[in-house]
Amino acid sequence: MISEITIGQYYTGDSLLHRMDPRMKFDLTFLLVVFVFACKSFFSLALVAMFTLVAILFSSVPLKMILRSIKPIVIIILFTAVLNIIYTTGGETYFKWRSIEITEKGINTAIFMAVRIILLVVISSLLTYTTTPTSLTDAIERLLSPLSVFHIKVHTLAMMMTLALRFIPTLIEEIDRIMNAQKARGAELETGGLIARSKALVPVFIPLMVSSFRRAYELAFAMTCRCYTGGEGRTRMKQMKLRARDFLALFTVIAVIAGIFVLNHFFEAVI
Amino acid sequence: MMAPALEIKNLTHYYYKGTKNQIAAVENVSLTVEKGETLGIIGHTGSGKSTLISHFNGLLKPDEGEVIVDGKNIFENKETLRQSRFKVGLCFQYPEYQLFEETVYKDIAFGPKNMKLPSEEIDRRVQNAAKLAGVKQELLNKSPFDLSGGEKRRAAIAGVMSMEPEVLVLDEPAAGLDPAGRLDLIKMIRHYRDVTGCTVIIVSHSMEDIARIADRVCVLANAKVAMHGTVKEVYSKGDELRSMGLNVPEITRIMLMLREKGIDVPADIYSPDDAVSAVRNYIEGRRGV
Ligand SMILES: Nc1ncnc2c1ncn2[C@@H]1O[C@H](COP(=O)(O)OP(=O)(O)O)[C@@H](O)[C@H]1O
Ligand SMILES: [Mg+2]
């Protein structure tokens, strides 16, 4: 059933990571993702991996959920690993068949790349697991606010994003409801070929459009009634405030980044 | 003996099954609806009414239990499931949101078309359903989106009636209408039942509406059948109903209060008109003494 699809992947909790300021979380995630690319040796990568593991422990998100975030990209990981094994050569040769050569360097690179991709995904999903979509857009709005110098309406964009996110579950529910109503009138939505199926969606799609416009008008009306006029002079209910834990996290991340360079310097580079 | 129109045996349905959020929306419910009978299903919001009726034509599959329409288990195979869609016409709450065709006529014809009926038969059914549901002839060629709220509701109900189901199930058909509109709609359904002789199941949380139409009432509370019986039997248990967040009709409450004061008026009064004549009878009876 459609309602079982989950969009956005917030994991409800009250951990240290959940309570952190979303702006700081967003910035630190960004920094870490960038500096994962600066890792040259296994040791610097291991440092980031260790930090990520500690962060997971502090997030109260079960390991099962974390693994679930990796699942969709397993194919990509395997694919890049195979390509790396085949196309990177150097060091000792383990296996040779015609032009295909599997070497020490190839295997090392493949493992390195795989770990790097996994780390990137885990770090960014840790952000979405511990931050509600709404506070995430709030954070993005704040972080992008300098762009208003170029007459870009950052607040409007963020509000659109928040509303879109807010209405995803509503729309899913609505689709479910309309599909049931049409099925009750004998509509066959789940059988037939591609063309038959897309034709069968018309009775679902039209009521959905109609009700989405109705909702949009109602919402706009309700917002106007509450004197919403856009971002100017608007204060927030939830004030974002940096606290000690945010600075603690910042210093830890800076230490990790410094560590990356130190380890890069002392150990052999893989790539 | 004739097979009942619809039989529900020990039906249980869970949402979020197998997760920590698992809830039983319907729990061990058994029901029998005889042919030609009108059953009212009543219950507080969230008591599982809509979930229960979505099983009647196989839109939801029970986690436990059986749904038997006209003597056949509807989940036996694909064909019985398909047939159940046509035998049991399900009209959801706010059915006007399912309208989609260019004209009201085409929308009412959607169900019969899916039944692959010949076009003369479709035409007959559309005209008949429109008349039964009180959709005026001149509206049939209009866009359904140009209709008023009440007209849309009737057009959508006609869209289910046009399948000529053996059992018509209506989920809160009068929701969101004003009192006069509610009364009109209930009258329309009563007329439909009297003309076609069909089995009708009507879901509501309004005791007034149910009293106006149902022969029997089934009260759902917390996913279970809490009471079951004729309107009179169920409505006489005002205290129990109140504990389930339901209330007997206002006018019935007044009659009960009069009885408590020792005024001997009947307790099974569900409409103000009946109350007026009952009180008049009482007064005249006393004068006669
Ligand atoms: N699609 C759904 N997914 C999850 N839970 C649902 C869904 N539909 C209903 N429920 C839950 O099941 C219970 C019964 O709901 P419902 O059958 O709609 O009751 P009613 O129609 O009597 O108001 C409620 O607790 C409701 O929150
Ligand atoms: Mg309901």
Image: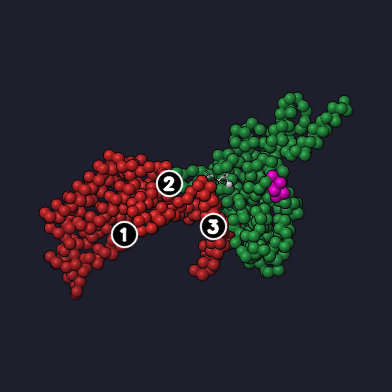
Chain colours: A red, B green
Residue with the most extreme left position: A266
Q: Which residue is mark 3?
A: A213
Residue type indicated by callout 2: Arg
> From which residue to which does the magenta span run?
B179-185
Q: Is residue B40 above or below residue A122?
A: above
- For the residues labelled 2 and 1, the Cα–Cα distance comes to 44 Å
Q: Which residue is mark 2?
A: A234
Q: Please name which of the two marks, 3 or 2, marks the residue nearer to the observer.
A: 2
Q: Main secondary structure of the magenta part?
A: helix
Image location (x, y in percent) of residue B158:
67, 57
The residue drawn where x is 62% and y is 37% is: B246
Can residue B184 be found in the magenta stretch? yes
Q: Is residue A257 at least partly visible in the picture?
A: yes
Can residue B98 be found in the magenta stretch? no
Residue type indicated by callout 1: Val
The residue drawn where x is 59% and y is 57% is: B98
- Mark 1 or 3, nearer chain start: 1
Q: How many marks?
A: 3
